[in-house]
Image (tube, rainbow, N blue to C red):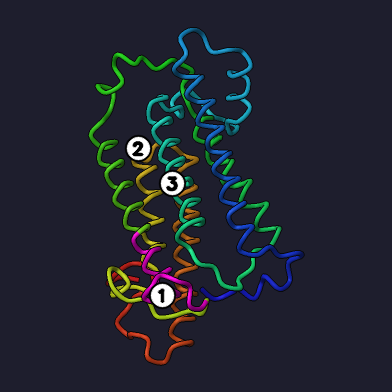
Amino acid sequence: MPKLSLARYLPSVIHSFEVQVYVRTRQRLYTSVLLVAVTTYFVPGELSPHIRDFLTLLRFPGCNERDLQPPLPVLLSLLMMEIQVIRRFLECLFISIYGNSVMSVVIYIVGVAYYSAIGLSAISLTHEEIISTDHLYSDLRWYQVLAVLLFIYASWKQNRLGIILAKLRKDKNGKVEDVKHHIPNGNLFEYCSCPHFFMEILIYAAICTVFLWQHEVLNCVFVFVLVNQTLSGLMSHKWYREKFPSYPKNRRAVLPFIL
């Protein structure tokens, strides 16, 4: 993918090895948040004053009772985030092949803060109640089941697309041949330049669907992901067309047949 010119103006850059550390840090943060949530909402008894005060502190000003969400979809969304970040970590270790790209320390810090805030934000808008395991499955709604299925599909498809990109830098024996950029072909790459960005958008859409789009903070997160992935896709698409004169003219940037 092309490097943004902004990177040269930011202090101290980190190379591909630190990307693994970056994703690993995100994974640990999500795991910690998930463990706290499970302990809080599955352990019988009253919520401790410390947990209650912490949740209140995280909520945005003016938050009232109708803004709060049941704990079950919150735990479901946290589990989906946990699976997402673990999958990305494993892909960094065993699938992705990095070139000479760099990551700014500033972007690194902002990214870690952003991803840790997502989990905490999901917890913050939760009713202070204990989940009953007797009614765990009966409390699931049809749209939450659809959201999980969409999440599974988008995650699987994004993994397949990542494998296609990685194979572009390997020979027939599976050894890394070079770290140059090549034109990807096959699967959704026949229709757009960055279908993996489209899958990222679907993943966060699935997380918001768990709440039927009633979680205001995660809705804002989705808008951020939508704008970020769309702009990144448009820039990458432009770069592909400038870099490769033979690049297919019928491909879109992010959304097949649309954008």
Q: Which residue is mark 2?
A: 210
Number of the label disc, if any, that sits on residue 84: 3
Residue 21 or 114: which is nearer the viewer?
21
Q: Marks 2 and 3, how far apart in space?
A: 15 Å
Q: Residue at x 60, y 45 (%)?
A: 25
Sequence order check, earlier mark of 2 and 3: 3
Callouts 1 and 3 close, C-beta under 8 Å: no
Tell me which amino acid carries mark 2. Answer: Val
Q: Residues within 10 Å of mark 3 (few under 14, many from 20)?
A: some
Tell me which amino acid carries mark 3. Answer: Gln
Q: Is residue 230 left or right of residue 141?
A: right
Which structural element holds mark 1?
Answer: loop
Q: Is residue 39 above or below residue 256?
A: above
Q: Quadrant of residue 213?
A: top left
Mark 2 or 1, closer to the camera: 1
Q: Horizontal and vertical percent for residue 181?
A: 48, 79
Q: Any magenta on residue 153?
A: no
Q: Which residue is mark 1?
A: 168
| Magenta segment | 160-178
Q: Marks 2 and 1, how far apart in space?
A: 36 Å
Q: Is residue 203 above or below residue 119?
A: below
Callouts 2 and 3 close, C-beta under 8 Å: no
Q: Is residue 123 left or right of residue 16?
A: left
Q: Residue at x 39, y 42 (%)?
A: 208
Sequence order check, earlier mark of 1 and 3: 3
Q: Any magenta on residue 172?
A: yes
Q: Horizontal and vertical percent for residue 252?
A: 34, 75
Q: Is residue 92 left or right of residue 83?
A: right
Q: Horizontal and vertical percent for residue 23?
A: 56, 50
Mark 2 or 3, closer to the camera: 3
Q: Residues within 10 Å of mark 2 (few under 14, many from 20)?
A: many
Q: Is residue 204 above or below residue 46?
A: below
